[in-house]
Amino acid sequence: MRIALRIVFVLAIVAAVTVLCYRIVPVNATTAGFAYLIAVLFVAARWGLTESIACAVAAVLCYNFYFLPPIGTFTISDPQNWVALFVFLSTSITASHLSTQAKKRTIEATERQREMEKLYALSRSILLIEPTQQQVAKQLAMRVAQGLGAAAVALYDRETGETYRSGPEDFPDSAAALQQAAVQGTFFREEQTGTVVTSIRLGAQPIGSLGLRGVDLSDSALQALANLVAIGLERARAQEAASRAEAARQSDELKSTLLDALAHEFKTPLTAIKAASTALLSSSGLGQEQQRELITIVDEETDRLSILVTEAIQLARIEAGRVQLRRESHSVCELINSVLEKIQPAADGRKIEIRIPPDIAPIWVDRELIEVALRQLIDNAFKYSPPDSPVSVTAAPSNGRVVLSVADHGPGIPEEEQTRIFEKFYRADASRHQIPGAGLGLVIAREIVHAHGGEIWVESKLGEGSVFHLSVPAAVEKASP
């Protein structure tokens, strides 16, 4: 329909040139020939070969009828005019063909430039893929679909045997073509559906295949796209291998640090236990009060050893992902009172202030684990604050959660160390050699709170003390079906 309208418009142009050169401004045959030639070139540059040929034929007929003698007929009396007519026709057609070819090359060059721009943007997008977010192959398929505006994308990873799809439409069921391209390195194109499947190579070895639908790419652009995807896959695998190596190295360092820390912490209670037991065995003249004191030392230091071992085991279980939460609804008052009863021997008569609103909602937690986290915070408050200063435990509601807080009046924590105290084995320089501990308590508390979907943080000022907060879900939010 469009071509027919264009041809009508082309005939109108020829008619306008004829009227101009024959009626309005009468000219000779040579000038009229140049005017027709300009019209043919204009049509060729504006549209295509079909329209320009139609223009050339119409121009030849009008030129013959109105400007070559005998005027008013389609016959030509002078043989030289026949030569001029054919030269004009061949010139018109050749010029229109060359103009169409130049226009076609311009369009192709523009398309190639757009392809290169899209591939450049896509390459930058692929380099920004984070392997930790989700599967890299899935991200690659998504980035290709978004970057090229493809209707459907399928990426087959030969190493895993999985196919990752993306795009607004479903990719045709071409599993056989995808696998064949990944294994044999073949190329498949289906013109009817606009589907293309090409192999993804790393060097000479195919590592997968890529399927596209709804996007027209040249062979060179398609090959460049396949190379980009191959680089993305190989980069992700290299990063994964490096991460595994780094994790293994850190695991070895962690084991070494853990053994060093535990050996150092075990040494003090073991020395006390050994001294007390040796005194009991070697001194038969000890009084009952002295024996009780030595036995008390053994009992307390044994409890300390038990706590150290329990902390290490709990941390290992939490980091290995073997902790399963057994959540139930628990009263905040009962939970805190239970914790205080268990740490009463370590309180040594210290004053503990409890401020809990009577109408506070119960919490939806694993009681045993949350008690462990609270014990760590309260035990830290005992260790880092003067014996005559009180420790306060409070609770407050906050947007469907309950925030439990433990405050002390110790020396406080420098601002630059407040984020590091939750790291494994980290201990402040000021207390490292004065207060016992392995630097695992806050790490255990943090992991327990995170397992509940909560948060733990500290607010502290030097010389004024510290307040540790942990938030846990309220039972009213979690208990509803």
Image (spheres, helix red, strand yellow):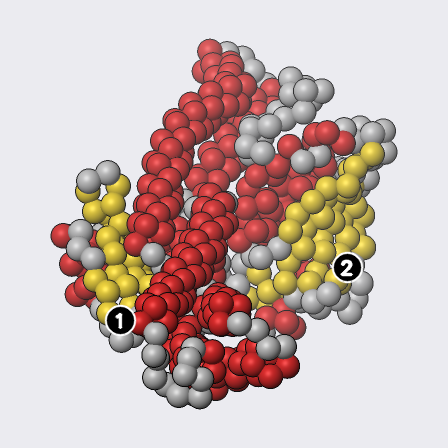
Task: Identify the amino acid type marked 1.
Answer: Glu
Residue in the image at 34% along x and 56% along y: 218
Q: Percent from the top left, x then y, of residue 365?
A: 57, 61
Residue at x-position 29% and y-position 68% = 195
Quarter of the rendering containing residue 401: bottom right
Rendered view: 256 above or below 359 = above
Q: Earlier in the sequence, mark 2 or mark 1?
A: 1
Residue 223 location (% of width, % of height): 31, 49
For the N terminus, the image quarter is bottom left
The one of 171 and 315 positioned closer to us in this rendering: 171
Q: Position of residue 3 (x, y in %)?
A: 43, 82
Q: Nearer the viewer, residue 396 or 53?
A: 53
Q: Which residue is mark 1?
A: 191
Marks 2 and 1 close (CB-CB < 8 Å): no
Q: Secondary structure at mark 1?
A: loop
Residue 481 in sight: no
Locate residue 249: give its quadrant: top left
Q: Is residue 110 above or below residue 344?
A: below
Real-space CA distance between mark 2 and mark 1, rounded to the nearest whole angstrom: 67 Å
Q: Is residue 416 visible?
A: yes
For label 2, count other residues whose C-alpha is less than 10 Å away and answer few (under 14), some (14-19) or many (20+): some
At a point 49% along the width and 67% down the height, the residue shown is: 30
- Per the image, the residue denoted by label 2 is 396
Q: Of the residues shown, which amino acid type is indicated by label 2?
A: Ala
Left or right of 259, for residue 384: right
Judged from this view, the residue extending furthest toward the right is 464
